[in-house]
Image (cartoon, grey):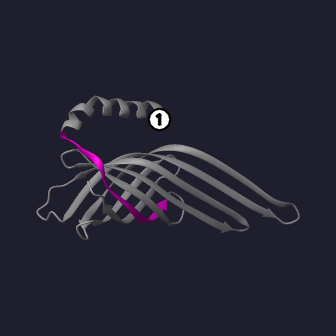
Amino acid sequence: MKRKALFVMVALGLLSASQAMAQSKIGFHAIGASAAFVSPQDLDGTFGLGVFADLGQIAPNIGLEPTIEFWSKSQDQFGLESSLRDISVGMRGKYYFQVANPKVRPFAGAGLGIHFLHAEATATVPGSGTFTATGDNTKLGLDLGGGISTALNSKNDFRAEAWYGIVSDVNQFAVRVGISHKLAM
């Protein structure tokens, strides 16, 4: 089912590519980094980090942004240590709303990501030793969110955003702040 959805998305993207390229301003416009508070499903909140790039506009007011994000959460309860890690690689489209003040750019967006999940649990049983179980899983996720971007100066932008990631068994809500640096074009 996930492969079919991914195939349909790629096919639709390729079919509309020629028209979009005529209106696009695609290029490597900026790079940035972000810090986040992430609240994964059924876990306490944790700290996350990310990097992103601004690839420009694929259509008027629609920007394209690849992302790499990471968070990890560990817990120790009753002699059982457990941890969960998520590294996601994705692409988001952002619609920038027209506003009177061009310095503040609100946006709403959506994207797809591949989540590389790693879970580990270690239990110490007195007299029997230590037992460890690990598991890795790769899942497709859908991101929905929005935020604002504003210029700090002519080369750097600040952004604040909130995203909800729909990932099987590990849905997550994240509030992010980041800085991007514009590259010479």
Magenta-drawn stretch, dominant element (helix, strand or loop): strand
Name the side, left or right, on which 91 lies relative to 109.
Answer: right
Residue 5 location (% of width, % of height): 41, 33
Q: Is residue 9 above or below residue 80?
A: above
Q: Is residue 22 above or below residue 54?
A: above
Tag 1, which secondary structure? helix
Residue 138 location (% of width, % of height): 55, 44
Name the foreground residue: 42 vs 102. 102
Mark 1 nearby-residue class (10 Å; few <14, some 14–19, many ≥20): few
Residue 63 location (% of width, % of height): 26, 49
Name the side, left or right, on which 138 lies relative to 131.
Answer: left
Name the side, left or right, on which 80 lies relative to 20.
Answer: right
* Residue under the point 42% across and 61% down: 174
Q: Which residue is mark 1?
A: 2
Residue 56 location (% of width, % of height): 27, 49
* Residue under the point 37% across and 61% down: 32
Which amino acid does the dot numbered 1 rest on?
Lys
Q: Which stretch is magenta? A: 23-40
Does residue 32 belong to the magenta stretch? yes
